[in-house]
Image (cartoon, helix red, strand yellow):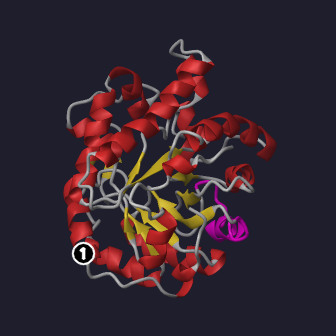
């Protein structure tokens, strides 16, 4: 994979510089924001379908999060894959163009943010199971080897790494086999990345200790932060503690709102538990990249960004200087 120097932040500070100086605010759930604006995301490509059908809607959603105070936008490539695009009749060249477009759209939105504000782009690298669109990313039961997963991820990683993103977001990873595959693919590339698991009660959906995944990332220089996303906000603090303790790196954390998906009614139920008061606890425990996932929208990110002004400067594990 290549890392083009042209995608370093225009203001002269890299994301690594920003992490060293203090916590960074991520965006919220991109797909749920797009759905709230009336877009149909029921296709197997989920929000990535709009890369083909309505790219301006994606740019507008990124711009909305930047306006809310997010410093990092995560691209719409989470569920995008060469096989998914092939099912729609796109050859590999056109599929690669669509992947690169996901970064370009976020970069365009960043360029439209106030010039005095720092803005970065994280290229989303979702798990293999996300491309299957059958919920297996929440089980991790692929039955694939490390080498098979490396081969599957490699083409997409190469395209996204060369597309102009500041960092790769290896996110919602459900099993240790896929963790190992992704870590080995980014090792030695000099392309910054964060590793984020989905897990509950300290275990991956495959039933493995999350601490093992965090420890696996400890000696990979390209990994700038480890942690969790798409999890319950009430469990996030424990996971941040585990991530920092077992990786000796800053933590990344962006949980769901706390609402639950009712599959029968095909609607969300429950109340939101995500809030800036929790984020303060995550920061104190070592989190340095903080945002939201499903059902966390711009209003929540606005509150998070406002609270960020009182967050402490980096110290302890956050003094680790990554390579972004």
How crowded pointer 1 is (Cα within 10 Å; few <14, some 14-19, many 20+) is rated as some
Examine the structure image and report whether residue 217 is included in the region drawn in magenta.
yes
**Count of marks, rendered view:** 1
The answer to whether 155 appears left or right of 30 in the picture is right
Examine the structure image and report whether residue 210 is included in the region drawn in magenta.
yes
Residue 243 visible in the snapshot = yes
Where residue 90 appears, as percent x and y from the top left, is 54, 15
Q: Which of 135 and 7 is in front in this view?
A: 7
Q: Residue at x 40, y 28 (%)?
A: 51
Where residue 92 appears, as percent x and y from the top left, is 62, 20
Q: Name the residue under label 1.
A: 307
Q: In which quarter of the image is residue 33?
A: top left
Quarter of the picture holding the C terminus: bottom right
Q: Which residue is drawn at 36% across and 56% down?
A: 119
The answer to whether 216 appears left or right of 311 in the picture is right
What are the residue bounds of the magenta stretch?
205-220
Where residue 264 appears, as percent x and y from the top left, is 33, 37
Q: Residue at x 65, y 77 (%)?
A: 246
Where residue 274 appears, as percent x and y from the top left, is 29, 65
Instruction: Check the image and report above or below for 147 versus 48.
Output: below
Q: Which of 215 and 50 is in front in this view?
A: 50
- Residue at the bottom extreme, as displayed: 316
Q: Residue at x 34, y 49 (%)?
A: 29
Q: Which of 170 and 203 is in front in this view?
A: 170
Per the image, label 1 sits on a secondary structure element best described as: helix
Quarter of the picture holding the N terminus: top right
Instruction: Check the image and report above or below for 38 versus 240.
Output: above
Q: Nearer the viewer, residue 41 or 22?
A: 22
Q: In which quarter of the image is residue 267?
A: top left
The answer to whether 70 appears left or right of 324 in the picture is left
Residue 143 visible in the snapshot = no
């Amino acid at each position: 994979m290549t890392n083009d120097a042209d995608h370093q932040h225009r203001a002269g500070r890299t994301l690594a510089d920003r992490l060293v100086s203090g916590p960074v605010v991520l965006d919220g759930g991109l797909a749920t924001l797009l759905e709230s604006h009336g877009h149909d995301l029921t296709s197997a490509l989920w929000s990535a379908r709009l890369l083909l059908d309505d790219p301006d809607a994606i740019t507008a959603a990124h711009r909305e999060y930047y306006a809310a105070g997010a410093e990092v936008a995560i691209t719409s490539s989470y569920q995008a894959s060469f096989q998914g695009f092939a099912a729609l009749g796109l050859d590999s060249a056109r599929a690669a163009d669509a992947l690169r477009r996901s970064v370009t759209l976020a970069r365009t939105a960043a360029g439209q943010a106030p010039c005095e504000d720092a803005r970065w782009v994280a290229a989303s690298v979702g798990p293999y199971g996300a491309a299957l669109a059958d919920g297996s990313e929440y089980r991790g039961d692929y039955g694939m080897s490390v080498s098979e997963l490396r081969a599957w991820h490699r083409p997409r990683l190469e395209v996204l790494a060369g597309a102009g993103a500041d960092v790769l977001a290896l996110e919602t990873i459900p099993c240790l086999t896929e963790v190992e595959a992704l870590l080995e693919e980014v090792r030695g590339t000099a392309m910054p990345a964060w590793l984020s698991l989905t897990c509950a009660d300290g275990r991956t959906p495959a039933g493995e200790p999350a601490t093992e995944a965090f420890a696996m990332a400890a000696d990979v220089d390209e990994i700038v932060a480890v942690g969790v996303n798409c999890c319950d906000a009430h469990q996030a603090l424990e996971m941040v503690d585990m991530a920092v303790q077992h990786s000796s790196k800053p933590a990344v954390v962006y949980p769901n709102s706390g609402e639950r998906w009712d599959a029968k009614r095909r609607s969300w139920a429950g109340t939101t538990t995500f809030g800036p008061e929790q984020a303060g606890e995550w920061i104190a425990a070592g989190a340095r990249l903080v945002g939201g996932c499903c059902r966390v929208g711009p209003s929540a990110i606005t509150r998070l960004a406002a609270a960020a002004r009182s967050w402490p400067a980096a110290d302890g594990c956050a003094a680790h200087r990554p390579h972004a």
